[in-house]
Image (tube, rainbow, N blue to C red):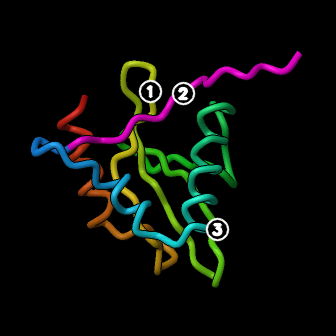
Amino acid sequence: MIDRTKKLPARFYVTPAGRNPVREWILELPEADRHTIGKDIQKVEFGWPIGRPHCAPLGHGLWEVRSDLGSNQIARVIFCMGDGYMILLHGFIKKTQKTPQADIELALKRKREVT
């Protein structure tokens, strides 16, 4: 029998002002990219614990959902865990081999707000 339950349901980080920056970022992307990122987040939700190529640890309690988009672009959604959920903290298009420190710092700042 196939297990169709989410092992780690996703929740969006919400700013103190009530904004959802990751959701807003995803909605700005082309439809095909939104679909790809959504499917990759879903793979983590249903397949947790899951490793590369779909998910990788960044350290400090942060993880990344890894998405290969069309036109040779790579997207990352950084998340942490809290109360049985994956909390989507920050999303961006990756332009360098290494994850930029500014993106990690922003995710860590948001993590401190929710955990």
Left or right of 92 on screen, residue 38: right
Identify which amino acid the numbered label 2 is placed on. Answer: Leu
Q: Amino acid at mark 1?
A: Tyr
Q: Main secondary structure of the magenta part?
A: loop
Amino acid type, mark 3:
Asp
Q: Give the residue at x 49% y 61%.
A: 76
- In the rendered structure, find residue 8 and report the number of the disc placed on it: 2
Q: Residues within 10 Å of mark 3 (few under 14, many from 20)?
A: some
Magenta part of the protein: which range? 1-14
Residue with the most extreme top position? 1
| Vertical placement of residue 50 versus 28, above or below | above
Residue 42: x %, y % from top left: 62, 41
| Residue on which disc 1 sits | 85
* Callout 1 touching callout 2 (CB < 8 Å): yes
Q: Which of 20/96 is in front? A: 20
The residue indicated by pointer 3 is: 68
